Image: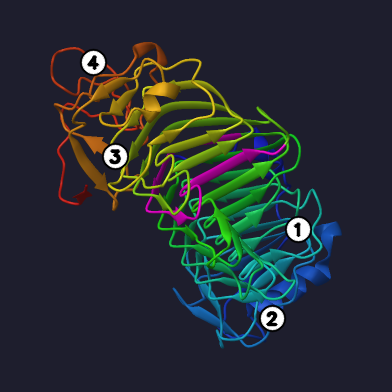
Amino acid sequence: MPRTLPALLLAFASLPAAAATFSVTSLDDDGAGSLRAAILAANAAGDATGPHRIEFTAAYPLNGEIELFTALPRINVIAEIDGNGRAPVLRPFDTTQDLRLLASSDALTLRRFTLQQGRAAGGGGCLASDGAGSVDSLVLDRMRFVGCLATGSGATNASGGAVRWSAVASVGVFETVFEANAAAHIGTGAGTGGAMAVSGPLLVQSSRFIDNATNGGFTSGGAISWLGATASTVEIRDSVFIGNFAVPEAGGSGFGGALALDCPNCTLSIVRSYFGGNRSADAGAVFARGNNGEGSAQITLENLSFVGNRVSGGGGALTTQGARLVGRHLSFFSNQADLGAHLTTSSTQLVEWSNSAMAPKRAGSGNACALSSAAASTLGTLLGTGDSSCSVGLPGAVAVSDFQIIGVDKAATMPVLAFETTSPAVDGANAARCLPTDARGVARPQDGNGDGSATCDVGAFELQATELFADGFED
């Protein structure tokens, strides 16, 4: 998908051109040509002549690793650090000791390099704001965060295994990978945001969150924890969340194996994305709450697949509270929970639930749906037979005995739950509620079943008439 910069983050695009460029040419921790020297020089130049650019030049070894023996200076100016095609890696020399890789008190843009195995007490194992204010935005562009760790103990909670940023500043994440990061409390305190803990307006686009985790007596957001302010916004699109965990210690509580989104009054949008194999105590993939009463969170979900997410409590895939919820072209399959294996709502106005596939839950689960109220509009939605829990809250949905599921190609850029040509989901959607593309960006409608009539498919997948499936699909 092409990267765009919507109104949420237009302020980023309006920044003036860099006033000075400082070069990184050396793998050394310190001295001429080092990253440390470049940060010191940018700080010395000051904000009055900024923003500044720190650039890895052609003299820097390709894929070279900088091993830090001590923490780098805090960045105190508006700055951009660009790997510039050299794919540098920044990591501690001793990964058993606390050493956060980068911290900034000002707006910061990071591009095209890797932060790996940083560790910090409290939060932001690899990157944190330190004194940044409401206008000090963060942009992550084609970055990688791997094995970063935020730790907590006693009264100090852990938040943002890889990234923790200023309370109300905007954060934009583009084509960035977060893998095997964690926020862990050694005890009964909280671990939140295995990859990221942020609170300002958030845009995540074309990014991957794989195997991130939170641990502690209370856990939330195995990938992202977002505690938003009034009138704040989250937009997540074209992104993948696989194998993230927010599983608490015995006797604790946990929410949102992938996402925990919580706000008094806010707008949340998640489109063209995949949630697979995420786990928590409750809300296996996504927990979204408006904490200011029913309808205080405006939630729109479009072209999403929820597959194989699991909890020990309720809401195997998705849980909403205090929300006004719209769902279009969603696919649910093999999620597991004691209650609401696919979907659980509380104090939620279910405004629309259209063209969605509520395929069979995982064996051993309780009801597939646990809904606080019936949907005002349910069109083009299919339900698995043998479980009437969804039909009560989704009136007019049609029960089918066999969805004829191919599976999910998890190696694809955008995994999606796919159906056979003869599936009732193919060409089975309501035309009035048909979205223009599927989760992969394939145009709708297509004549997937070859009957000569192009009609939209149910769920997040639009079968193309000429589509051939390679090995790699998993059911």
- From the viewer's perspective, is residue 200 above or below residue 380? below
Q: Nearer the viewer, residue 123 or 84?
A: 123
- Tell me the CA gap for discs 1 and 4: 52 Å
Would you name the residue on which mark 2 appears?
A: 71
Give whichever of discs 4 and 2 has the lower sequence position: 2
- Rendering quarter of residue 41: bottom right
- Tell me the CA gap for discs 4 and 2: 59 Å
Would you name the residue on which mark 1 appears?
A: 78
Where does residue 473 sit, x and y in percent of width and height? 21, 48
The residues colored magenta run 268-291
Looking at the image, is mark 1 or mark 3 nearer the viewer? Answer: 3
Give whichever of discs 2 and 3 has the lower sequence position: 2
Q: Nearer the viewer, residue 124 or 157?
A: 157
Q: Helix or strand or loop: what does disc 1 sit on? A: loop
- Within 10 Å of the Cα at label 2, are there few (<14), some (14-19), or many (20+) other Cα atoms? some
Name the amino acid, label 3: Leu
Labels 4 and 3 touching (C-beta < 8 A): no
- Within 10 Å of the Cα at label 4, are there few (<14), some (14-19), or many (20+) other Cα atoms? some
Name the amino acid, label 1: Ile
Would you name the residue on which mark 3 appears?
A: 417
- Tell me the CA gap for discs 2 and 3: 44 Å
Tell me, for residue 254, which label it has, or none: none
Where does residue 185 sit, x and y in percent of width and height? 62, 71
Name the amino acid, label 4: Ala
